[in-house]
Image (spheres, helix red, strand yellow):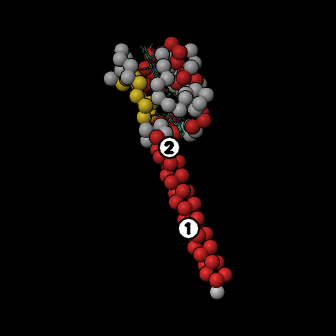
Amino acid sequence: MRAKRSSVLARKKGERKVKVIAAGLVVLVMCIFAVSAMAVPPGKTVEFPDGALGKVIFDGKIHADKGLKCNDCHTKIFPMKKGAKLTMADINAGKFCGECHNGTKAFASKDAGNCAKCHKK
Ligand code: HEC
Ligand code: HEC
Ligand code: HEC
């Protein structure tokens, strides 16, 4: 009699443990979604507020639609956070955006006809 009751108790305890683990998994999955929602592509943009020629908006969706994956840019070209110091000289020298916008992988940053593709008034 006694033994039976304690085994029922043990089973209840076990069920509670499973529930706690399941709740933990839900939270974990939600965190993963929250992190990927912060990602630049797809559907998010980063603005570089350059004055002279107009601000530059980096659009994650355009780049994702071209088949680029996170690790094409992160972290060998850009850290996974805002605030890289970009200059046109560095870009034209093949750094940052210029790793691709060099006329080979994507339109060249140096061509006068392309300035307005990145710089918007
Ligand atoms: C074509 C290049 C490129 C690709 C591909 C790319 N990113 Fe980025 N990402 C950037 C640039 C540029 C920035 C801004 C860096 C800066 O401002 O210094 C950035 C910024 C970020 C940030 C910081 C955003 C913020 O608001 O602080 C996160 C997070 C991020 N990327 C995640 C991702 C993930 C996840 C993927 C893949 C799904 C991805 N990126 C693909 C170029 C890229
Ligand atoms: C692939 C995108 C891209 C193209 C194409 C491009 N730029 Fe830029 N440019 C940038 C980014 C990004 C910055 C940094 C803006 C910031 O940090 O606020 C920048 C900054 C600048 C600056 C600010 C000062 C400096 O030297 O950093 C000038 C001036 C400039 N670009 C001129 C040009 C001219 C002229 C062209 C065309 C011959 C051009 N850019 C084409 C992305 C581009
Ligand atoms: C890993 C390679 C890669 C990097 C790094 C990269 N791009 Fe691109 N980008 C591309 C490709 C590929 C395309 C589409 C092909 C094309 O338009 O030549 C593209 C397209 C674009 C376009 C669309 C232009 C249009 O009118 O359709 C803009 C704007 C742009 N990139 C800006 C930037 C800026 C700003 C940066 C740096 C912050 C950057 N890209 C970094 C590969 C890259």
Ligand 1 is within 8 Å of the C-beta of the residue at disc 2: yes
Tag 2's secondary structure? helix
- Going 49% across and 52% down the picture, which residue do you hit? 30
Residue 46 in sight: yes
- Going 64% across and 78% down the picture, which residue do you hit? 7
From this viewpoint, which residue is outermost toward the right? 3
From this viewpoint, which residue is outermost toward the top? 89
- Going 57% across and 60% down the picture, which residue do you hit? 21
Q: Is residue 96 above or below residue 44?
A: above
Q: Pick the residue in front: 3 or 88.
A: 3
Residue 84, percent from left and from top: 49, 23
Mark 1 — residue? 16
Name which of mark 2 and mark 1 comes first in the sequence.
1
From this viewpoint, which residue is outermost toward the left? 121
Q: Is residue 28 left or right of residue 43?
A: right
Ligand 1 is within 8 Å of the C-beta of the residue at disc 1: no
Task: Give the crowd class for mark 2: few <14, some 14-19, many >=20 residues within 10 Å.
Answer: few
Nearer to us of marks 2 and 1 is 1
**The disc labelled 1 sits on which kind of residue?**
Arg
Tell me the quadrant of the picture where the C terminus can be found.
Answer: top left
Task: Give the crowd class for mark 1: few <14, some 14-19, many >=20 residues within 10 Å.
Answer: few
Q: Pick the residue in front: 80 or 103.
A: 80
Residue 6, numbered label: none
Residue 82, percent from left and from top: 47, 29
- Going 59% across and 70% down the picture, which residue do you hit? 13
Q: Is residue 82 left or right of residue 79?
A: left
Mark 2 — residue? 35
Q: Is residue 67 above or below residue 19?
A: above
Residue 50 found in image quarter? top left
Q: CA distance from mark 2 to mark 1?
A: 29 Å
Residue 17, percent from left and from top: 58, 65
**The disc labelled 2 sits on which kind of residue?**
Val
